[in-house]
Image (cartoon, coloured by chain):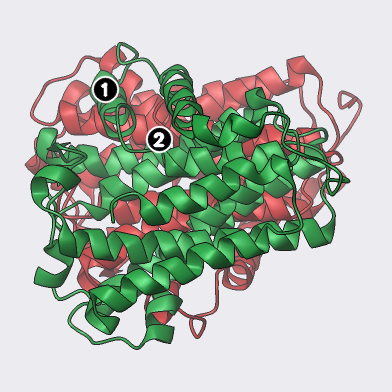
Chain colours: A green, B red
Amino acid sequence: MKITDMRPERPAEAGDFQAWMGGIQTRMETVLARLLPAAHVAPTKLHEAMRYATLEGGKRVRPLLAFAAGEVAAAARERVEIVAAAVEMIHAYSLVHDDMPCMDDDVLRRGKPTVHVEYDEATALLVGDALQSLAFQILCENKIADDASRQLEMAKMLAAAAGSRGMAGGQCIDLEATGKALTLPELEFMHIPKTGALIRAAVLLGCSCGASLSEAEKARLDRYAKSVGLAFQVVDDVLDYDASTATLGKTAGKDSRQGKPTYVSAMGAARAKAFAEELRQGAHAALAGFGAEALRLRQLADFVVLRKF
Amino acid sequence: MKITDMRPERPAEAGDFQAWMGGIQTRMETVLARLLPAAHVAPTKLHEAMRYATLEGGKRVRPLLAFAAGEVAAAARERVEIVAAAVEMIHAYSLVHDDMPCMDDDVLRRGKPTVHVEYDEATALLVGDALQSLAFQILCENKIADDASRQLEMAKMLAAAAGSRGMAGGQCIDLEATGKALTLPELEFMHIPKTGALIRAAVLLGCSCGASLSEAEKARLDRYAKSVGLAFQVVDDVLDYDASTATLGKTAGKDSRQGKPTYVSAMGAARAKAFAEELRQGAHAALAGFGAEALRLRQLADFVVLRKF
């Protein structure tokens, strides 16, 4: 894809970022509501709980990244919404399992009781399990790429990002790190799989729905995704440190109370904020070779880092 | 595939069923050991526990069914072993999660401490999650069908079998049924997804690795798989009722103590055994149109029903 000659079609478009974001968020609500089994279909308790865990929740950062990356490859939105939904289901399942008593033992998520509190632990376990299956099912049964081989590659990418060398593995490292003081490289070793892998998958799956990119372009998007993924975690740590329960919608300050190593505990809040800013600039630098088609990716890097500071 | 003219190549072959079964079981141990991340790869605790949960365990009934179904379509064993491993990983993950305290709370499985006892609950949760991801990863990254579209279909089939309208959904119905007296149709409604869906997937995925079968042939295999799947559960219920902890290698008699409805509680042990025998005959009847290439499927129907009576 040749992109160097492209210029923004609408120079004022940067100003409509909030509208763009709101549009994607609304669309994702509809898409997820359609892709999740209806609450009246048996087993109704499980399906109701799956919808509770996934709908009306969160900023949909990963879907936003998938749509933004899709613009770089001029991907059809009907395809991007499927990969965005699959990534979001994996994310939702991980939250349900992470909140369980044997993991982070959290009772509040996005301002609502967590799934095991609203239902029960067994249901929470099954909700997570079934959401993961559903993510792969929708990736395989909807047309999301020009050819089936690429689609297999995409499903494999999501599986690897979710698995033991991705998200689930990062969560394991996180649990083992509780009560320890980690160095910055150790923190990175934990967070690159824990949150970074799925954010990277969102970006790479979004652009895979569209025209083929060159290896160099994919490498740039990969670099962008790594910066944004890490920035996301650094900012989360700062927010957890700063925010009150009321504004964050989850039990705040919990990481430090549980003795979890964070970027704030490792380098202090001020340096952590500066590090997030560095990562934001790194994300922009990675996109330097792209034109206006990467506008949303740039705006999202800003949004991730500046959202609450 | 034309099969009506085929005759057994070796008339004495029925006698070598034990050898055939042992060969597949040994092969699956090697295949699973190769496909699972090595225990020395980080995160080592998770990878070690994933191997603990999957290796050296069980009769490998689902892989045996996949290999037997593969013979009907003359499938390459290098393909069948991948789908067999994927199905077995889904099965292994479901055992790990089902054994957890919030579900069946079991401490013994295949004669060994269950994963949450040997490690801890958080690790057991992540082991199950990561095994599910790995199952889809290996299905997508290895060549298991002549074309990628069929392979996508196969991955979708496993996802549907594992999900909320398959295994995970059946488990939810099972939990809700505890303490209730179920009718036979209600028991079937629970067990067809709970154990039947994955057994059906093993059969259909095994034959999908090979030559295309006609719709009629696929329908026959589907009927076979449903009979064997249900028979498997009926026999399990009888074994749970009959067997001592020593011979079964798991805590026996537990279902009735936990107030779980079983085929024994619904119809008595003698009638449950007769029902299993009916299902075995139904499985044979479904295969009537096949020749010697379905020998292993027939033998497995016998094995599933007669294994411990």
Q: Position of residue B269 (x, y in %)?
A: 23, 31
Q: Distance of mark 1 from mark 2, alpha carbons?
A: 17 Å
Looking at the picture, does residue A224 appear above or below residue B232?
A: below
Left or right relative to A98: residue A119? left
Total numbered labels placed on residues in the image: 2
Left or right relative to A114: residue B144? right
Estimate how packed mark 1 is, as few (under 14), some (14 to 19) or many (20 or more) residues with alpha carbons within 10 Å.
some
Q: Where is residue B207 in the image (x, y as percent from the top left)?
A: 73, 37
Q: Which amino acid does label 2 sit on?
A: Met
Estimate how packed mark 2 is, as few (under 14), some (14 to 19) or many (20 or more) residues with alpha carbons within 10 Å.
many
Residue B198 appears in view: no
Q: Where is residue A78 in the image (x, y as percent from the top left)?
A: 64, 23
Q: Give the quarter of the figure containing the C terminus of chain B.
A: top left
**Closer to the eye: label 1 or 2:** 1
What residue occupies the far front of the structure in this picture? A11
**Residue at image mark 2:** B167
**Residue at image mark 1:** A48
